[in-house]
Image (tube, helix red, strand yellow):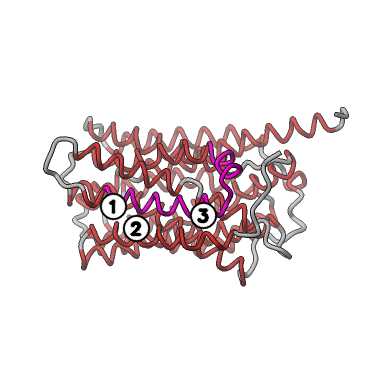
Amino acid sequence: MSSSILPALERAKTAQRAVATYFLANGIVMGAWVPHVPDRARDLHLDPGTLGWALLASGLGAVMAMPIAGRMTGRLGSRAVCRVAGVAFPIMLSAVVLAPTALLMALALLCFGISGASMDVAMNAQGIAVEEQLGERTISRLHGVWSIGSFTGAAITSFALSRHVPARAIVLSFSVFVIALVVAATPSLFTRAEEGLHEQPHTLRPHGRLLLLGLVAFVSMVCEGSIADWSGLYLRVVRGAGHGVSGYGYAAFAALMVSGRLSGDAVVARFGEERTLLVGGLLAAAGLGVVIGTGWQHMTSELWWLLGFALVGAGLANGSPVIYRTAGRVPGVPAGAGIATTVGIGYAGLLAGPPGLGFVGKHAGLTSILLCVMVLCCVMAVSSRLVRGLAAPAAG
């Protein structure tokens, strides 16, 4: 290996660690928000429908931010967008949790969605650049790091709430910690010139197979987001779980997402993209069946709920990484643009889909939300044929 290649590889590895930090930080913020949802609904006297309207603001913010973030990433470089969004996102977390009224919480959620979506687009653009420089697949691992952050944020917040630590102290501590993480990591990200992607479009008008892949990503992320937004309230209201304990369902889900994504490249290499997506969707649907079918008749019910949510996490773990990687191999579409466009559609599903299911829950009960997610998991499984013929080669 020539001496000129070595510094380039070292630089790429440095940038990889920095972008992994961003994925970790983004996951922490998302995970830390989840256990607060039932308490926010209780404190502000929100029924599932009203809570759904409030949560929909974050999805609206994400949809608004996606095209703008894509253009700004292409014009200024993803590091510049990461720098701003990475600081704004944890600040908005505190604003959402501390908002004194439903209206102010909805406004904070709008900004939460805008900053989170912008951060997501920018850090995925960095991830694409790192992948190209290293010459190996890293998307599953980066999403695995995101899941580590999500699990950590949810677990620590749930534990602190169960010990009656004030929500203000919890959320402000998380915000300060995340800001410190991203500020320290930002200088190591690729510059606009180093990315080498600014001459290509960062987003496209989706059509054909790319549009279908985007819709599958939307479905996958609706499932992920619905577990985040509604699992705690379901366990609290329907199953009678105690204060703080309701967040453990999502923590179990996120924990299996971590292991599934960190091993994702090996799983895909062994079983293939199509089979991974098919089996994953069916496994997630089965996990939701366990959660819904287990009552409160015996002391082991909580363990069954945790097992069910863990199966959902294992099943959904490689859904979005497989879809994003496949979108980067659509013929005639630049890899970066294909992935970024699909990420954008998927992220809209993450934030906009679950609130939509809140309206279903208002009229048909919270259990109906999980039933809808179960159906969507089956849709994802059936859609696995879309990745046929575009499977990525094993990482080298």
* Amino acid type shown at disc 3: Ala
- Range covered by the magenta-colored residues: 263-290
Residue at 47% across, 47% down:
89
Marked residue nearer the N-terminal end (1 or 3)? 3
* In the rendered image, the vertical position of residue 360 relative to residue 231, given as above or below: below
**Number of marks in picture:** 3
Q: Are marks 1 and 2 in contact (CB under 8 Å)?
A: yes
Q: Secondary structure at mark 2?
A: helix
Badge 3 element: helix
Task: From the image, tell me which residue sits under label 1.
Answer: 289
**Above or below: residue 29 compared with residue 278:** above
Q: Measure the C-alpha gap from mark 1 to mark 3.
A: 31 Å
Q: Position of residue 127 (x, y in %)?
A: 64, 45
Give residue 35's quadrant in the image: top left
Percent of width and height locating residue 385? 55, 62
276 within the magenta span: yes
> Circle 3: is it few (<14), some (14-19), or many (20+) Cα within 10 Å?
many
Circle number at residue 76 = none
Residue 83 coordinates in the image, percent (x, y): 59, 44
Q: Which residue is mark 3?
A: 117
N-terminal label among 1 and 2: 1
Mark 2, Cα crowd under 10 Å, few <14 / some 14-19 / many 20+, is: many
Which of the two discs, 2 and 3, labels the residue nearer the N terminus?
Answer: 3
Residue under numbered circle 2? 374
Residue sitting nearer the eye, 307 or 246:
307
Q: Quadrant of the N terminus?
A: top right
- The residue shown at (45%, 32%) is 177
